[in-house]
Amino acid sequence: MASQNTDPAAASSTAALKGNDSGGSATKGSVTKRLQQELMTLMMSGDKGISAFPESDNLFKWVGTIDGATETAYDGLRFRLSLEFPDGYPYHPPRVKFLTPCFHPNVDDKGFICLDILKDKWSALYDVRSILLSIQSLLGEPNNESPLNTAAADLWSDQDAFKAHVQATFPR
């Protein structure tokens, strides 16, 4: 997987240090092209329960939505997320966080998400669609071995109590 995360622009930055100015704008242009392509792919995918669009005219900041998976504590809920793409995308993961409060073992009180594909398991092969689907899946299948919210992780084993807490906190 490491080869998919090797940024070809890194070679350009070495050239830029030697006096050639080809690194920055070329990199930003390729990221813009990639994000435009991902937006079209996401719009055409027809996936139920996920969407994302650039925030105003800034292609590097998106707002996404995820519907809670059916037959989970989040069934019937819709969550908003922010996605911020670095200049090195797709070789570096975007910063993704919940804007809507989410009581979940792998989401802290500020909305930050503990998900391996957004950290050490990131690959340039991932796209916005796969990120949103992974987060949607995480809602129903948390990693209790690595909780950001220990209260949610402790309550997760009692699904009736967990659902009652979510429903009381986030009414439908």
Image (tube, helix red, strand yellow):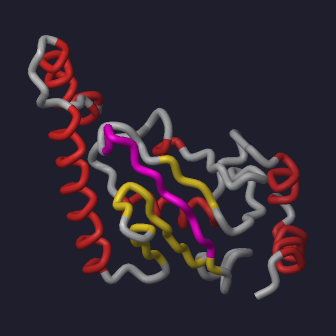
Residue at 27% across, 64% down: 38
Spot occupied by residue 78 in the image (x, y as percentages of width and height): 62, 79
Above or below for 137 versus 170: above
Q: Is residue 19 left or right of residue 164?
A: left
Spot occupied by residue 106 in the image (x, y as percentages of width and height): 69, 50
Spot occupied by residue 87 in the image (x, y as percentages of width and height): 33, 41
Q: Is residue 44 left or right of residue 105?
A: left
Spot occupied by residue 165 in the image (x, y as percentages of width and height): 88, 71
Query: Is-magenta flag for residue 80?
Result: yes
Residue at 49% across, 69% down: 64
Q: Is residue 128 left or right of residue 80?
A: left
Query: Is-magenta flag for residue 137?
Result: no
Q: Is residue 142 left or right of residue 135?
A: right
Q: Nearer the viewer, residue 162 or 14?
A: 14
Question: Which corner quadrant holds the C terminus?
Answer: bottom right
* Segment tinted magenta in the rendering: 79-89
Residue at 81% across, 77% down: 170
Q: Nearer the viewer, residue 96 or 117?
A: 96
Question: Which corner quadrant holds the N terminus?
Answer: top left
* Residue at the outermost top position: 18
Residue at 86% across, 64% down: 158
Above or below for 21 versus 166: above
| The image quarter in which residue 156 lies | bottom right
